[in-house]
Image (cartoon, rainbow, N blue to C red):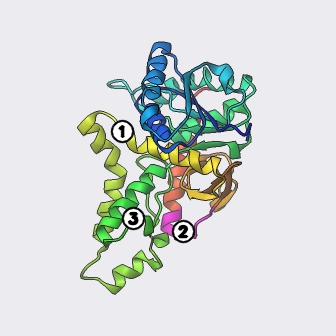
Amino acid sequence: MANNNRKVVLIGTGMVGMSFAYAALNQSVCDELVLIDLNDVRAKGEAMDLNHGLAFSNSSMKIYFGDYSDCSNANIAVICAGVAQKPGENRLELLQRNTKVFSSIVPRVVSSGFDGIFLVATNPVDIMTRVTYELSGFNAAKVIGTGTTLDTARLRYLLGQYFEIDPRHMHAYVIGEHGDSEFVPWSQAMMAVNPVLDMLEKYPDRYKMDDLDRISNDVRTAAYEIIKAKGSTYYGIGMAVCRIVRAIFNNENSVFTASVRLRGEYGLRNEVFIGNPCIINSGGANRILELSLTDEELEKFKNSYTILNESFHSIQI
């Protein structure tokens, strides 16, 4: 890590960024939080607002508006900056516009002398994480995207309701693209110590595959439902970012389905950033956990890989 002072620079003070900042303040995950935004006035106002809540928290966090020079001794650079999709704009057009935004951010972070860990939350997160990797020239272990971390949390919440168990004891994952091609490898899902598929076989009148398929679909479409209801999603992803930051600072070796660069797993080339279980600690993405997927699940994963790779090569950096 860059220093003993736990310092985070947040780039992008929109709803996602500030949901993370608010969670970080309440959970005291860092000692210093710097807000950077193209809109200086907004960033200054957000810093003021957070500081006014310090008296009601258990934190003594130092929070202030800053600039890219403040990245020089930061441990983590959280990137939540990006542009919203315009009416009638397709996904690739949005990709190109956000790539342009990142081209104005990442080199400035690096040129400050930053030697920490990039944590990307901007969508489409898998591709934007790869863009960050290409622009930064950093070791891939130090460039992480939120990937399907939130999707996995959504899955465990719904499975907890279905099996009537604390979701923290549901060990199931959403992997692949953080998007329409993501999927749940049910062969790997566990309810505490019991494989989920065994539960279906043991209690066929109570648990059914159709229900699991519905849950998987609900997870995949959750963001659409939230956006339809309130315009955008931000609390869940903000807390997911906060959780990953805490794992880095505490050197936890915790497992998240973050967006990480493959290292030959599943027989695929090490170029695509994709959601997959990995161990995260103070060094970043320490180790990728290759799952024992069925042939059908492997094909789904390869489909996500292909979509992400083709989308990346459709943009200009």
Quadrant location of the N terminus? Answer: top right
Q: CA distance from mark 3 to mark 2?
A: 23 Å
Residue at (50%, 56%) from the top-left corner? 175
Return the residue at label 3.
167
Residue 192 is inside the magenta segment? no
Q: Is residue 35 in view from this perspective?
A: no
Q: Can you tell which of label 2 and label 1 is closer to the viewer?
A: 1
Which residue matches tag 1? 233
Question: 248 left or right of 84?
Answer: right
x, y percentage for residue 272?
A: 62, 46
Q: Do callouts 2 and 1 mark residues in contact (Cβ within 8 Å)?
A: no
Element under disc 1? loop
Q: Is residue 78 above or below residue 251?
A: above
Give the residue number, with chain letter if any, for mark 2.
Answer: 293
Q: Start and end of the magenta stretch? A: 289-298
- Quarter of image, res 90: top left
Splitting the image into 4 quarters, where does residue 138 fall? top right
From the top left corner, tell me how far across and down residue 132 is, in percent. 63, 33
- Between residue 169 and residue 250, name the one nearer to us: 250
Tell me which residue sits at (38%, 55%) in the image. Answer: 154
Residue type highlighted by circle 2: Leu
Percent x, y for residue 95? 49, 30
Q: Nearer the viewer, mark 3 or mark 2?
A: 3
Measuring 42% from the left and 31% from the top, which residue is drawn there? 53
Kindly identify which numbered label has been placed on residue 29.
none
Of callouts 3 and 1, the N-terminal one: 3
Q: Earlier in the sequence, mark 2 or mark 1?
A: 1
Rendered location of residue 207, percent (x, y): 29, 76
218 over 227 or under it: above or below: below
Q: Residue furthest top?
A: 41
